[in-house]
Amino acid sequence: MNRRHLFSLFAAMPIAACATSTGAPDYTQAVADVQAISGALAAEAPVILAAFKLSAATTAKITAILTDIQKNAAALSVASAPAVVAPTSIQTVISDVQTLAPIVLAAAGLPPQTVAAVNAAIALLPILSATIGKSSDTLAKPVYTPAQARSVLLASIAK
């Protein structure tokens, strides 16, 4: 076994970790993560929109992104064939969080729980990317572990 062969095995590990014994991705955790992101950001939306003076255009953009995340989370939760719906819905949620996060995190004076919820959503993006077989190289470095991120998101939903 040469070095090139070993490196090729390591490159496939993150994606393989998301697969079931049949080789197909297991979307169960990804669907739960998308729903947690959706619920937490929806719970934090009033704080985000009221925390600072936003232009009408920015408010509309944030509202549209949050609505899109909720729509895709709902599509995943009722999908009879997750393998058909999941890749597109998960990719959309990843893109939406990547668009929303810099807008929200640029605001001064947000409560720590709101900042934590946005950072927790960011922390789950690499896992969601791996689930759909996409590279996470361009994603921001997570502040939380996946377990911590899920805990923070659930705390935002429960508040």
Image (spheres, grey):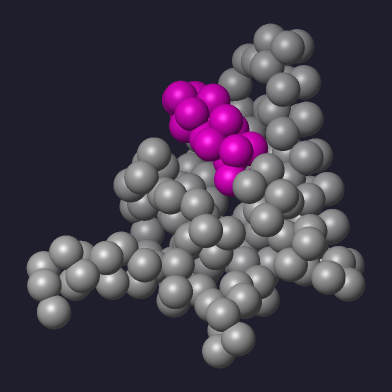
Q: Is residue 105 magenta?
A: yes
The residue drawn where x is 59% and y is 45% is 94
Is residue 78 left or right of 64 when viewed as pictured? right
Magenta stretch, overall SS: helix
Q: Is residue 20 above or below residue 55?
A: below
Residue extending farthest to the bottom is 21
Number of marks: 0
Q: In the displayed structure, would residue 78 be above or below residue 89?
A: below
User: Horizontal placement of 46 versus 138: left or right?
Assistant: right
Measured as percent of width and height from the top left, residue 44 is found at 66, 45
The vertical placement of 150 against 60, above or below, is: below
Where is the N terminus found, in terms of image quarters?
bottom left
Query: Which region shows up in magenta?
Result: 93-109
Q: Is residue 99 above or below residue 85?
A: above
**Does residue 90 appear left or right of residue 5 in this picture?**
right
Q: Position of residue 125 (x, y in %)?
A: 50, 52
Residue visible at 21% across and 70% down? 5
- 72, 102: nearer the viewer: 72
Q: Is residue 157 visible?
A: no
Which sits in the foreground, 94 or 39? Answer: 94
Left or right: residue 6 versus residue 100 is left
Residue 155 magenta: no
Q: Residue at x 41, y 42 (%)?
A: 139
- Check the image and name the residue furthest to the front: 1
The residue that appears at 63% across and 15% down in the rendered structure is 53
Say which quadrant the C terminus sits in: bottom right
